[in-house]
Protein backbone atom coordinates (compact mmCIF):
# COMPACT_ATOMS: atom_id res chain seq x y z
CA UNK A 1 0.00 0.00 0.00
CA UNK A 2 1.49 3.38 -0.93
CA UNK A 3 1.20 6.59 1.02
CA UNK A 4 -0.87 8.28 -1.63
CA UNK A 5 -3.67 5.69 -1.33
CA UNK A 6 -4.37 6.63 2.26
CA UNK A 7 -6.52 9.57 3.14
CA UNK A 8 -7.36 8.75 6.76
CA UNK A 9 -4.87 7.61 9.38
CA UNK A 10 -4.68 7.13 13.15
CA UNK A 11 -2.44 9.54 15.00
CA UNK A 12 -1.36 9.24 18.63
CA UNK A 13 -0.18 12.47 20.20
CA UNK A 14 1.03 13.72 23.59
CA UNK A 15 -0.37 17.03 24.85
CA UNK A 16 0.51 19.18 27.84
CA UNK A 17 -2.51 18.89 30.11
CA UNK A 18 -1.43 20.84 33.22
CA UNK A 19 1.44 23.15 34.20
CA UNK A 20 3.65 21.84 37.03
CA UNK A 21 4.21 24.37 39.80
CA UNK A 22 7.77 24.20 41.17
CA UNK A 23 8.07 20.42 40.63
CA UNK A 24 9.17 18.18 37.79
CA UNK A 25 6.26 17.12 35.55
CA UNK A 26 4.45 13.90 36.49
CA UNK A 27 1.94 11.83 34.52
CA UNK A 28 -0.92 14.20 35.39
CA UNK A 29 0.77 16.97 33.40
CA UNK A 30 0.50 15.00 30.12
CA UNK A 31 -2.40 13.64 28.10
CA UNK A 32 -1.95 11.04 25.35
CA UNK A 33 -4.75 10.98 22.78
CA UNK A 34 -5.43 8.92 19.67
CA UNK A 35 -7.38 10.53 16.84
CA UNK A 36 -8.34 9.74 13.27
CA UNK A 37 -7.12 12.43 10.89
CA UNK A 38 -7.36 13.12 7.20
CA UNK A 39 -4.09 13.48 5.40
CA UNK A 40 -3.76 17.10 4.21
CA UNK A 41 -3.15 18.10 0.62
CA UNK A 42 0.46 19.27 0.87
CA UNK A 43 1.23 22.92 0.32
CA UNK A 44 4.26 23.75 -1.82
CA UNK A 45 7.44 23.11 0.19
CA UNK A 46 5.84 20.96 2.90
CA UNK A 47 6.18 17.27 3.76
CA UNK A 48 4.17 14.57 5.53
CA UNK A 49 6.41 12.56 7.87
CA UNK A 50 6.54 9.59 10.20
CA UNK A 51 8.29 10.49 13.47
CA UNK A 52 10.51 7.43 13.69
CA UNK A 53 12.47 7.98 16.90
CA UNK A 54 12.12 10.52 19.72
CA UNK A 55 14.93 11.79 21.92
CA UNK A 56 13.67 12.14 25.49
CA UNK A 57 15.49 15.09 27.02
CA UNK A 58 15.22 16.72 30.45
CA UNK A 59 14.74 20.20 28.91
CA UNK A 60 11.19 19.26 27.85
CA UNK A 61 10.20 20.37 31.34
CA UNK A 62 10.64 24.01 30.26
CA UNK A 63 7.90 23.74 27.62
CA UNK A 64 5.30 23.65 30.38
CA UNK A 65 4.57 27.36 30.34
CA UNK A 66 1.34 29.26 31.01
CA UNK A 67 -0.86 29.07 27.91
CA UNK A 68 0.60 25.79 26.62
CA UNK A 69 -2.10 23.41 27.86
CA UNK A 70 -3.62 21.26 25.10
CA UNK A 71 -0.61 21.93 22.83
CA UNK A 72 1.64 19.04 21.73
CA UNK A 73 4.92 18.40 23.54
CA UNK A 74 7.80 19.01 21.13
CA UNK A 75 11.25 17.45 21.35
CA UNK A 76 14.20 16.43 19.23
CA UNK A 77 13.81 13.38 17.06
CA UNK A 78 14.29 11.82 13.66
CA UNK A 79 11.64 11.65 10.97
CA UNK A 80 11.23 9.92 7.65
CA UNK A 81 9.50 11.66 4.74
CA UNK A 82 6.42 9.74 3.54
CA UNK A 83 5.09 12.30 1.10
CA UNK A 84 6.78 15.41 -0.23
CA UNK A 85 6.26 18.62 -2.13
CA UNK A 86 9.78 19.80 -1.30
CA UNK A 87 12.64 18.77 -3.60
CA UNK A 88 15.20 19.05 -0.76
CA UNK A 89 13.29 16.44 1.27
CA UNK A 90 12.33 13.61 -1.10
CA UNK A 91 10.22 10.62 -0.04
CA UNK A 92 12.37 8.25 2.05
CA UNK A 93 14.82 10.93 3.24
CA UNK A 94 15.47 11.41 6.95
CA UNK A 95 16.25 14.42 9.08
CA UNK A 96 16.44 15.42 12.71
CA UNK A 97 14.87 18.43 14.31
CA UNK A 98 12.07 19.53 16.59
CA UNK A 99 9.11 17.18 16.23
CA UNK A 100 5.80 17.00 18.06
CA UNK A 101 5.39 13.87 20.17
CA UNK A 102 2.96 12.27 17.70
CA UNK A 103 3.08 9.50 15.13
CA UNK A 104 2.64 11.55 11.95
CA UNK A 105 3.18 15.24 11.25
CA UNK A 106 2.86 17.66 8.36
CA UNK A 107 5.76 20.13 8.36
CA UNK A 108 5.75 23.41 6.45
CA UNK A 109 8.66 24.83 4.45
CA UNK A 110 9.30 27.25 7.35
CA UNK A 111 9.62 24.41 9.86
CA UNK A 112 11.84 22.45 7.47
CA UNK A 113 14.29 25.36 7.34
CA UNK A 114 15.24 24.44 10.94
CA UNK A 115 15.86 20.70 10.50
CA UNK A 116 19.13 18.95 9.66
CA UNK A 117 19.12 16.32 6.85
CA UNK A 118 20.81 13.08 7.92
CA UNK A 119 23.14 10.78 6.03
CA UNK A 120 22.59 7.58 7.99
CA UNK A 121 25.41 5.06 8.29
CA UNK A 122 23.84 1.63 7.85
CA UNK A 123 26.36 0.08 10.28
CA UNK A 124 25.17 2.26 13.15
CA UNK A 125 21.83 2.13 15.01
CA UNK A 126 19.46 5.02 14.34
CA UNK A 127 19.52 5.95 18.02
CA UNK A 128 23.12 7.22 17.83
CA UNK A 129 21.81 10.16 15.81
CA UNK A 130 19.81 11.21 18.87
CA UNK A 131 22.83 10.85 21.15
CA UNK A 132 26.53 10.58 20.59
CA UNK A 133 26.28 11.48 16.86
CA UNK A 134 23.37 13.88 17.29
CA UNK A 135 22.86 17.26 18.89
CA UNK A 136 24.07 15.94 22.27
CA UNK A 137 27.41 14.72 20.96
CA UNK A 138 27.76 17.82 18.83
CA UNK A 139 27.11 20.10 21.81
CA UNK A 140 29.98 18.53 23.74
CA UNK A 141 32.39 18.31 20.80
CA UNK A 142 31.75 21.93 19.83
CA UNK A 143 31.66 23.46 23.33
CA UNK A 144 34.94 21.77 24.30
CA UNK A 145 36.61 23.11 21.14
CA UNK A 146 35.17 26.61 21.25
CA UNK A 147 35.06 27.35 24.94
CA UNK A 148 36.95 24.94 27.19
CA UNK A 149 40.49 25.43 25.88
CA UNK A 150 41.50 21.89 26.97
CA UNK A 151 45.19 21.43 27.74
CA UNK A 152 46.92 18.09 28.31
CA UNK A 153 47.79 17.56 31.97
CA UNK A 154 44.91 19.68 33.28
CA UNK A 155 42.09 18.30 35.42
CA UNK A 156 38.44 18.56 34.38
CA UNK A 157 35.36 17.78 36.49
CA UNK A 158 32.08 16.85 34.78
CA UNK A 159 28.73 16.79 36.61
CA UNK A 160 25.90 14.46 35.46
CA UNK A 161 28.79 12.55 33.94
CA UNK A 162 26.92 9.34 33.13
CA UNK A 163 24.31 11.28 31.13
CA UNK A 164 24.44 11.64 27.36
CA UNK A 165 26.61 14.76 27.30
CA UNK A 166 28.73 13.82 30.30
CA UNK A 167 29.85 10.52 28.78
CA UNK A 168 31.08 12.20 25.62
CA UNK A 169 32.70 15.09 27.50
CA UNK A 170 34.77 12.75 29.68
CA UNK A 171 36.01 10.66 26.79
CA UNK A 172 36.90 13.63 24.58
CA UNK A 173 38.79 15.26 27.46
CA UNK A 174 40.65 11.97 28.09
CA UNK A 175 41.65 11.84 24.43
CA UNK A 176 43.17 15.32 24.87
CA UNK A 177 45.28 14.08 27.79
CA UNK A 178 43.36 15.59 30.69
CA UNK A 179 42.72 13.99 34.06
CA UNK A 180 38.94 13.43 34.18
CA UNK A 181 36.68 13.35 37.25
CA UNK A 182 32.93 12.77 37.10
CA UNK A 183 29.95 12.51 39.41
CA UNK A 184 26.76 10.50 39.02
CA UNK A 185 23.77 9.43 41.08
CA UNK A 186 24.43 5.72 41.67
CA UNK A 187 27.36 3.44 42.45
CA UNK A 188 26.66 1.50 39.27
CA UNK A 189 26.98 4.69 37.20
CA UNK A 190 30.17 5.63 39.08
CA UNK A 191 31.68 2.22 38.26
CA UNK A 192 30.64 2.65 34.62
CA UNK A 193 32.48 5.98 34.45
CA UNK A 194 35.77 4.59 35.73
CA UNK A 195 35.68 1.01 34.38
CA UNK A 196 34.04 1.47 30.98
CA UNK A 197 34.66 5.09 30.00
CA UNK A 198 38.12 5.46 31.52
CA UNK A 199 37.43 8.38 33.89
CA UNK A 200 40.31 8.76 36.37
CA UNK A 201 37.99 9.22 39.34
CA UNK A 202 34.26 9.44 40.03
CA UNK A 203 31.94 9.80 42.99
CA UNK A 204 28.28 9.31 43.86
CA UNK A 205 26.91 12.81 44.58
CA UNK A 206 23.88 11.31 46.36
CA UNK A 207 25.77 9.28 48.96
CA UNK A 208 28.93 11.38 49.33
CA UNK A 209 29.30 15.02 50.29
CA UNK A 210 30.13 16.60 46.90
CA UNK A 211 32.54 19.18 48.37
CA UNK A 212 34.74 16.69 50.17
CA UNK A 213 34.46 14.02 47.46
CA UNK A 214 35.47 16.48 44.75
CA UNK A 215 38.27 18.02 46.79
CA UNK A 216 39.74 14.62 47.54
CA UNK A 217 39.35 13.38 43.92
CA UNK A 218 41.06 16.52 42.62
CA UNK A 219 44.07 16.11 44.92
CA UNK A 220 47.01 18.50 45.20
CA UNK A 221 47.09 19.41 41.48
CA UNK A 222 43.75 21.17 41.87
CA UNK A 223 40.96 21.65 39.34
CA UNK A 224 41.31 23.53 36.05
CA UNK A 225 37.96 23.09 34.28
CA UNK A 226 34.38 22.47 35.39
CA UNK A 227 32.06 21.18 32.65
CA UNK A 228 28.75 21.95 34.32
CA UNK A 229 25.62 20.11 33.22
CA UNK A 230 23.61 20.66 36.40
CA UNK A 231 23.92 24.31 37.62
CA UNK A 232 23.40 23.47 41.29
CA UNK A 233 25.26 24.32 44.49
CA UNK A 234 28.34 22.43 43.27
CA UNK A 235 29.16 25.63 41.43
CA UNK A 236 30.00 27.32 44.74
CA UNK A 237 32.37 24.47 45.66
CA UNK A 238 34.04 24.65 42.28
CA UNK A 239 34.54 28.43 42.50
CA UNK A 240 36.42 27.79 45.76
CA UNK A 241 38.67 25.03 44.50
CA UNK A 242 39.40 26.02 40.88
CA UNK A 243 43.02 26.84 40.12
CA UNK A 244 43.89 30.35 38.93
CA UNK A 245 42.91 30.82 35.24
CA UNK A 246 40.41 27.97 35.60
CA UNK A 247 37.34 27.72 33.36
CA UNK A 248 33.70 26.93 34.02
CA UNK A 249 31.77 25.85 30.94
CA UNK A 250 28.08 26.13 31.69
CA UNK A 251 26.16 23.83 29.34
CA UNK A 252 23.29 22.18 31.25
CA UNK A 253 20.73 22.94 33.92
CA UNK A 254 19.60 19.51 35.08
CA UNK A 255 18.78 20.99 38.52
CA UNK A 256 16.28 23.39 36.95
CA UNK A 257 14.68 20.59 34.93
CA UNK A 258 14.02 18.89 38.28
CA UNK A 259 12.29 21.99 39.64
CA UNK A 260 15.19 22.57 42.08
CA UNK A 261 16.62 25.97 42.90
CA UNK A 262 19.47 26.82 40.55
CA UNK A 263 22.86 27.87 41.89
CA UNK A 264 23.29 31.33 43.36
CA UNK A 265 26.95 31.14 44.45
CA UNK A 266 28.02 33.61 47.13
CA UNK A 267 31.67 33.46 46.11
CA UNK A 268 31.54 34.89 42.58
CA UNK A 269 34.36 37.18 43.67
CA UNK A 270 36.66 34.23 42.93
CA UNK A 271 36.11 34.91 39.23
CA UNK A 272 38.08 38.12 39.69
CA UNK A 273 40.51 36.97 42.36
CA UNK A 274 41.57 33.85 40.44
CA UNK A 275 41.06 35.31 36.94
CA UNK A 276 38.58 32.58 36.07
CA UNK A 277 36.54 32.32 32.89
CA UNK A 278 32.84 31.45 33.30
CA UNK A 279 31.17 30.97 29.94
CA UNK A 280 27.81 29.66 28.82
CA UNK A 281 27.31 27.66 25.65
CA UNK A 282 24.18 26.77 23.69
CA UNK A 283 24.26 24.70 20.57
CA UNK A 284 21.59 26.51 18.62
CA UNK A 285 23.75 29.11 16.90
CA UNK A 286 26.71 26.83 16.27
CA UNK A 287 25.59 24.21 13.74
CA UNK A 288 28.00 25.57 11.12
CA UNK A 289 30.55 22.96 12.22
CA UNK A 290 28.14 20.01 11.86
CA UNK A 291 29.98 18.55 8.83
CA UNK A 292 33.34 18.54 10.60
CA UNK A 293 31.74 16.96 13.69
CA UNK A 294 30.32 14.07 11.60
CA UNK A 295 33.68 13.60 9.87
CA UNK A 296 35.62 13.44 13.14
CA UNK A 297 33.19 11.62 15.42
CA UNK A 298 31.60 8.98 13.15
CA UNK A 299 34.79 6.90 12.79
CA UNK A 300 35.48 7.15 16.54
CA UNK A 301 32.00 5.86 17.37
CA UNK A 302 32.12 3.13 14.72
CA UNK A 303 35.49 1.87 15.91
CA UNK A 304 34.37 1.88 19.54
CA UNK A 305 37.03 4.42 20.52
CA UNK A 306 34.19 6.60 21.81
CA UNK A 307 31.83 4.44 23.85
CA UNK A 308 28.29 5.27 24.83
CA UNK A 309 25.54 3.79 26.95
CA UNK A 310 22.03 4.46 25.76
CA UNK A 311 18.52 3.13 26.14
CA UNK A 312 16.12 2.51 23.28
CA UNK A 313 12.53 1.87 24.30
CA UNK A 314 10.31 0.40 21.60
CA UNK A 315 6.60 0.93 21.65
CA UNK A 316 5.51 4.10 19.95
CA UNK A 317 4.03 7.34 21.18
CA UNK A 318 2.05 5.47 23.88
CA UNK A 319 5.20 4.86 25.94
CA UNK A 320 6.80 8.30 25.52
CA UNK A 321 5.42 9.90 28.70
CA UNK A 322 6.33 7.01 31.01
CA UNK A 323 9.82 6.86 29.50
CA UNK A 324 10.31 10.62 29.88
CA UNK A 325 9.30 10.42 33.57
CA UNK A 326 11.91 7.68 34.06
CA UNK A 327 14.54 9.92 32.44
CA UNK A 328 13.77 12.56 35.05
CA UNK A 329 14.24 9.98 37.84
CA UNK A 330 17.73 9.13 36.54
CA UNK A 331 16.68 5.54 35.74
CA UNK A 332 18.84 5.28 32.61
CA UNK A 333 22.42 5.97 31.54
CA UNK A 334 22.98 8.16 28.53
CA UNK A 335 20.60 9.03 25.75
CA UNK A 336 17.08 7.65 25.98
CA UNK A 337 15.14 7.22 22.76
CA UNK A 338 11.69 5.91 21.95
CA UNK A 339 11.60 4.05 18.68
CA UNK A 340 8.14 4.22 17.17
CA UNK A 341 8.77 1.64 14.48
CA UNK A 342 9.21 1.71 10.75
CA UNK A 343 7.08 3.94 8.58
CA UNK A 344 3.90 1.94 8.14
CA UNK A 345 1.51 4.07 6.12
N1 LIG B 1 23.70 24.03 26.06
C1 LIG B 1 23.24 23.26 25.10
O1 LIG B 1 23.23 23.62 23.92
C2 LIG B 1 22.71 21.91 25.47
C3 LIG B 1 22.51 20.91 24.49
C4 LIG B 1 22.05 19.65 24.91
C5 LIG B 1 21.76 19.41 26.26
N2 LIG B 1 21.93 20.44 27.15
C6 LIG B 1 21.65 20.25 28.58
O2 LIG B 1 22.67 19.46 29.17
C7 LIG B 1 22.13 18.82 30.35
C8 LIG B 1 22.46 17.33 30.31
O3 LIG B 1 21.77 16.76 29.21
P1 LIG B 1 21.86 15.19 28.92
O4 LIG B 1 21.19 14.97 27.61
O5 LIG B 1 23.26 14.72 29.12
O6 LIG B 1 20.96 14.61 30.07
P2 LIG B 1 20.57 13.08 30.31
O7 LIG B 1 21.36 12.15 29.48
O8 LIG B 1 19.09 12.97 30.23
O9 LIG B 1 21.01 12.86 31.79
C9 LIG B 1 20.36 13.48 32.81
C10 LIG B 1 20.95 12.93 34.10
O10 LIG B 1 20.95 13.97 35.04
C11 LIG B 1 21.13 13.36 36.29
N3 LIG B 1 20.44 14.12 37.31
C12 LIG B 1 19.12 14.17 37.57
N4 LIG B 1 18.89 14.99 38.60
C13 LIG B 1 20.08 15.45 39.01
C14 LIG B 1 20.49 16.33 40.03
N5 LIG B 1 19.62 16.88 40.86
N6 LIG B 1 21.82 16.61 40.16
C15 LIG B 1 22.70 16.04 39.32
N7 LIG B 1 22.37 15.20 38.33
C16 LIG B 1 21.07 14.90 38.20
C17 LIG B 1 20.57 11.93 36.19
O11 LIG B 1 21.64 11.03 36.38
P3 LIG B 1 22.17 10.68 37.86
O12 LIG B 1 21.62 9.33 38.17
O13 LIG B 1 23.65 10.71 37.70
O14 LIG B 1 21.63 11.72 38.81
C18 LIG B 1 20.12 11.84 34.74
O15 LIG B 1 20.37 10.57 34.17
C19 LIG B 1 20.64 19.12 30.34
O16 LIG B 1 20.39 20.23 31.17
C20 LIG B 1 20.37 19.50 28.89
O17 LIG B 1 19.23 20.32 28.74
C21 LIG B 1 22.41 21.65 26.80
Image (cartoon, rainbow, N blue to C red):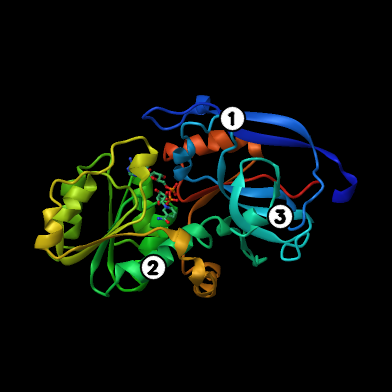
Residue sticking out furthest to the left: 273
Category of crowding for the residue at label 3, using alpha-carbon neighbours closer than 10 angstroms: few (below 14), some (14–19), many (at least 20): many
| Label whose residue precedes the other's in the sequence (3 or 1) | 1
Residue 140 lies in what quarter of the image? bottom left
In the picture, measured across the screen, residue 221 lies left or right of residue 131, that is left
Secondary element at tag 3: strand
Give the residue drawn at x 40%, y 58%.
282
Residue ID for mark 3? 80
Residue at 28 percent across and 39 percent down: it is 206
**How far across and how far down the image is residue 273, in percent?**
9, 61
> Can the viewer see residue 225?
no
Looking at the image, do the residues carrying marks 3 and 2 touch, with CB atoms under 8 Å apart? no
In screen coordinates, is 64 left or right of 225? Answer: right
Residue 195 as seen in the image, left or right of residue 98: left
Mark identifier at residue 230: none
Question: Which residue in the protein does label 2 denote?
Answer: 172
Between marks 3 and 2, how big is the CA–CA gap? 31 Å
Residue 64, image x, y percentages: 47, 35
Dot 3 or dot 2, earlier in sequence? 3
Residue at image mark 1: 70
| Label 3, label 1: how far apart the Cα atoms are | 26 Å
Query: Disc 1 on helix, strand or loop?
Result: loop
**Label 3 beta carbon within 8 A of ligand 1:** no
Q: Cβ of disc 2 within 8 Å of ligand 1?
A: no
Amino acid sequence: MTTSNITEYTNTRVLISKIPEGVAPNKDHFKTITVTETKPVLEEGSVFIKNVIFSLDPYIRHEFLPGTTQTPVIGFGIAKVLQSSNASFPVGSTFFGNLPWETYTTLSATALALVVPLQLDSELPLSVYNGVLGTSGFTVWDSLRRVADLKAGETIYISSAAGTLGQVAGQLAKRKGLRVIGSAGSDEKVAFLTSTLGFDAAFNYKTQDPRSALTSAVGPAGLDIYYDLVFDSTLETVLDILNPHGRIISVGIVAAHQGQAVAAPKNLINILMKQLRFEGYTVYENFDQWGLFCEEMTPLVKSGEIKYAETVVEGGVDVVVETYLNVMKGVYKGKVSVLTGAADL
